[in-house]
Amino acid sequence: MNKRALWKDTFREIGRSKTRFLSIFAIILIGVAFFAGLSATGPVMIHTADSYYDDQNLSDLHVFSTMGLEAEDREILNSLDNAEVNYLYSQDVIFDESGLTSKVIGWDKEQHSINDFKVVEGRLPENTNEIAIDHTNSYVDEYALGDTIKINEETSENREAALKEHTFEVVGFLNSPLYIERINRGNTTIGSGNLDGFSVVSADVYDMEIYTDAYILFDQSSEYVAYSTEYQDFIDSKTGEVEELMSERPNKRYEALYEEIESEIGEGYEEIEEARQDLEEGRVELQDARNEIDEGFADYQAGMDELEREETNARAEIENERTQINQALNEIEENKSQLEAAQMQDSPAYEELLTQEEQVLAGLVELGNAESQLNAELAASREELEAARVELEEAEAEYQDGSAEFESEAAEAEAEIEEALVDLEEAETELADLAEPEYFVNDRTSLAGYGEFDENAERISAIAKIFPVFFFLLAALISLTTMTRMVDEGRNQIGTLKAMGYGDMAIATKYFVYAFIATSFGSVLGLFLGYWLFPNVILDAYSSLYNLPSAQTQFYWNYAVISLAAALLATGLSTLVSVRLSLRSNAATLLRPKAPKKGKRIFLEYMPFIWKRFSFTQKVASRNLFRYKRRMLMTLFGVAGGTALLLTGYGLSDSIADIADVQFGEINLYQAVVAENTEATAADRESLVATLENVEGFEKQLPSFQENVKANKDGETRDLTLFVPSDAELFKDFVVLRDLENQSNTYELPDDGVIITDKLAELLDVTVGDTIELEWDDSKTIEVEIDAVSEQYVQHYIYMSPDYYDQVIDEELEYNTRLLIYDEQISDNELGEQLIEEEAVLGVTFVTAIKDAFQDSMDSLDVVTVVLIISAASLAFVVLYNLTNINVSERIRELSTIKVLGFFDKEVTMYVYRENFVLTIMGIFIGFVLGVFMHRFVLQTAELDIMRFLSQITWSSYLYSFLLMFFFSSLVMVVMHFKLKHINMVEALKIPD
């Protein structure tokens, strides 16, 4: 047989039935685009993130310790094979004026090649007085290029001077692969406890001897895709390797530090002893000087006394001799007078007297000379003694000054010694309390936003596994209806071809080729549209949460093959079902018109009290509805399917919209969680309690114990948080434990069992009365009995009373957290600043921050739900249009007849619309029922292991779904109205029934 004519007829059929061809094309395009696009979105998100991490050289591991990293630590890390290690300085500080917290990173262009910064605006710092800051909203709103930032190190993390510069000029805004999340920057031990962002300065700004952080990037990590199981297994092995290398460092560093501190304490005591000896020697020297001066004054006084005594004796002797000489002169004068009176001047006696007189006068002269000499000697002695006195007085003055200075310096020295003794005593106490430094080896999952991004991608991938199935089911339904109508219209042609000798396969080929072309074109265009549109739209929505580049779309052959196969299967099976019955008939049967359906009374006709009240058009519409049952069922299923998809999309939005409010408003009633230092003293804890009680508006606090453990049941293992409050009665004011199904039924902590959260119970497949095994990292295990299962939407918890903890765990309960409830008017930031100053506080986490971050993550799914709703709406419109178009095509002769009978265009449209209206309303309500089940199924499939969605659909979602479907139905009838207006009645009436 000549197949060429058959092929020509096939392609001409496409031209003759553009509407039918486009309906199949559109339904397949939407279904394939939705499936391929939504399925590819998760992988595209991962691929985009992975490319960004590779481009920015995101580190695989972050190593740090509570005491920094010494040369020995760096030597060990540098020994890693096939790895690059960067070391840097960092410190958490508070910016003056703005009060914003920041992690200041010391960056060196020559040394740092890991975690490359992406400059958003400006540049990286080049000088020590320049700073580049995080491109986060809190910084962008506060600072601009050229602004000045001042840092007060008294409010810094370690309270010690680590920076050489404290005033910087803003020269750039940056993004870092370490902080892909736009809002959350992690916690800090300063300020309110929340880190507002990071900043970068030159490494030369830091005045530190040891590095604070080490970032490691392994050469092989680029061979794996981020978030993949292979990558995580690789990193887990490397993490274990690094932890093994650093395992001995805490003890060695502890011993070295202990010896160093002990040596410094010993040297301190030696220095104190030397200082005391120096003081004692100074006192001795001062006393010797005092004694020497006193001796000098005594010698001076003795000299003066001796001089006066000698002067007195000498002058007495001189006076005695003068007296004797004067007496001798008097005697000589008397004798001379007697001899002169006797005129014996020439006598020898007189001559002898003259000689004696001369001798006496000479003696008197000598006596005068002796007196003058005495006076000279006395003056010299007095001058010498006076000089000694002046010298002694100068020594006394010097002594007094030296004594005063010594006493002042001695007092200062004594105070310094006392301070040194106090410091040494504190050092000895610290030495006694000295603990081994902690070394931390964190992988990427510790980075803010890294794990959440993967969870968001998983959510979308989970949704992509559900919705497209329903899309393809509707596509199969429409294809079946369309191809059935096409086969019915070509019934005579099929009979002719059979009469001409064409085989069944040749005849069926026309319809298969028709469906194949429409499906292929729709699939190809749907693939490219879906691969480009969905990932870009959804990732663009997530750009408000994450600092990532635009979507890096790819062509995924696996989804393409699945989409094409599913589309071809849907249309192929529909075509096969449609053409199979016609091909079974012989040519003679096919060439005769199809016998009209036998008229039957419908059930309403058996209810005259209703039927009699119907008008003529209402009776005709009612009969047509139930006369063409297949058409009715197809329309019902189509409308119900579209409504169900719309309701599921809106319901999904409802299910994620209120999770944060329920979890952090109805179940968790506290506003903050304080992480406490378990090594704090009782005085430090009392200080914390006093600080809280002095806060105006503070209401309650509950010390509690929280610890990460694992729960095992029949080989199934889940991570969870063990929660033990200090007061089981007070605990009810902080956390509401209630039944998931009956929320008015609340639980109290039992004394002989535990309460676990519902999602955990579901994953472990356990219920009340069962036992599960709890396991700690140190391989310690216990078995506990489940007393109740409580409602929970985020994370897994096991709640245990303190009494039951004492029964099952042979350890002293040491509370490490404190839950707080306070008035909403209290500022979280101000309260955080007060608490973070307490020695007993390690950190403060505010529920508002957790709630906002979680809600932002959930809100990002709104875009996904919008995409679902738009896609479902588009599909619903195509379904309604196609079904209505087929309905009109099948009844073209009937509609032409009533037009000939005088029906106006509006009446003809209403003739069809009444049926569509009833079927639409019926289909919508059926869709509501189907949508509820679809919504539950989607929630169960799309939920992650660590969270539960709210199983709720609000009345507004029903209303929106109803209005959309009703709008589409009306819109289709508006389009059909213009088609009905232009029916060629003559040609239509020529068509045999």
Image (cartoon, helix red, strand yellow):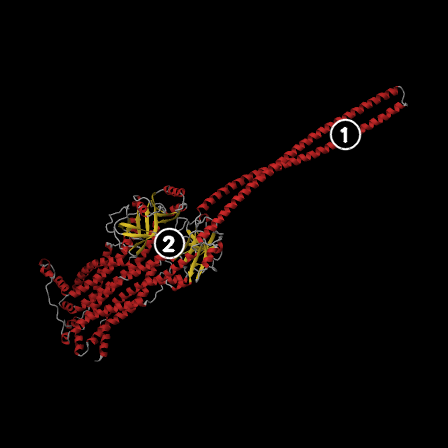
**CB under 8 Å between discs 1 and 2:** no
Q: Residue at x 21, y 62 (%)?
A: 639
Q: Amino acid at mark 1?
A: Glu
Q: Position of residue 294 (x, y in %)?
A: 63, 34
User: In the depicted view, which residue is nearer to us: 375 or 984?
Assistant: 375
**What kind of element bears circle 1?**
helix
Farthest-out residue, bottom: 1
**Label whose residue precedes the other's in the sequence (1 or 2):** 2
Compared with 818, 989 (above or below) is below
| Amino acid marked by disc 2 | Asn
Image spot of residue 85 (x, y percent): 45, 59
Can you give x and y, in whole percent of width and height, for residue 170 in the image? 45, 55
| Of 598 and 931, the residue lying toward us | 931
Residue of label 2: 184
Name the residue carrying label 1. 371
Which quarter of the picture shows residue 950? bottom left
Using the rendered view, name the quadrant where residue 902 is placed: bottom left
Residue 939, placed above or below residue 287: below
* Camera-side mark, 1 or 2: 1
The quadrant the N terminus occupies is bottom left
In the displayed structure image, the side of residue 211 where residue 812 appears, left or right: left
